Amino acid sequence: MEKKSIWGLRQRALGRLDTTLILFELVLSVIFFAVGHLIGSGYIRGVGVGLIIAWVTSALAYLYRKKKVKP
């Protein structure tokens, strides 16, 4: 019986994996961008900007896929 509950938990976690990863990418981009400004490092700030661009791209792809699946 315990295998069923673990399997169900795993399935629910995998079902929300795309949303979780998109939010994680947003949080990382904000952290890198803020730290880059605080310490005055253009490189770290650039990493934050790159992550923001990647976040926007993945969020748009997610919304497009969600709209396409549910007409």
Image: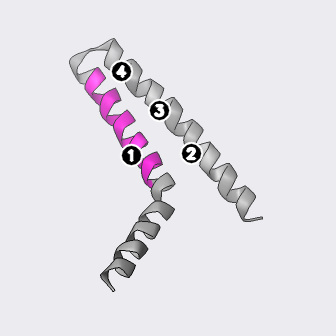
Residues at marks 2 and 4 touching, judged by CB atoms closer than 8 Å? no
Q: Earlier in the sequence, mark 4 or mark 3?
A: 4
- Gap in angstroms between the C-alphas marked 2 and 4: 21 Å
Q: In the rendered structure, does residue 29 fall within the stretch colored magenta?
A: yes
Q: Amino acid at mark 2?
A: Ala
Residue 10 figure quarter: bottom left
Identify the residue at image location x=39%, y=23%: 47
Q: Position of residue 43 (x, y in %)?
A: 34, 14
Residues at marks 1 and 2 touching, judged by CB atoms closer than 8 Å? no
Pointer 1: what residue?
24
Query: Mark 4: few, some, or many residues within 10 Å (few <14, many ≥20)?
Result: many
Q: Position of residue 4 (x, y in %)?
A: 39, 80
- Gap in angstroms between the C-alphas marked 1 and 3: 11 Å
Q: Earlier in the sequence, mark 2 or mark 4?
A: 4
Q: Amino acid at mark 4?
A: Arg
Q: Amino acid at mark 3?
A: Ile
Which region shows up in magenta?
Answer: 20-36
Question: Which residue is at the far left?
Answer: 39
Q: Secondary structure at mark 2?
A: helix
Pointer 2: what residue?
59
Classify the position of the C terminus by image quarter.
bottom right
Position of residue 61 in the picture relative to residue 27 (left or right): right
Q: Nearer the viewer, mark 1 or mark 3?
A: 1
Question: On residue 52, which mark appears?
Answer: 3
Q: How many marks?
A: 4
Pointer 4: what residue?
45
Classify the position of the N terminus by image quarter.
bottom left
- Gap in angstroms between the C-alphas marked 1 and 4: 17 Å
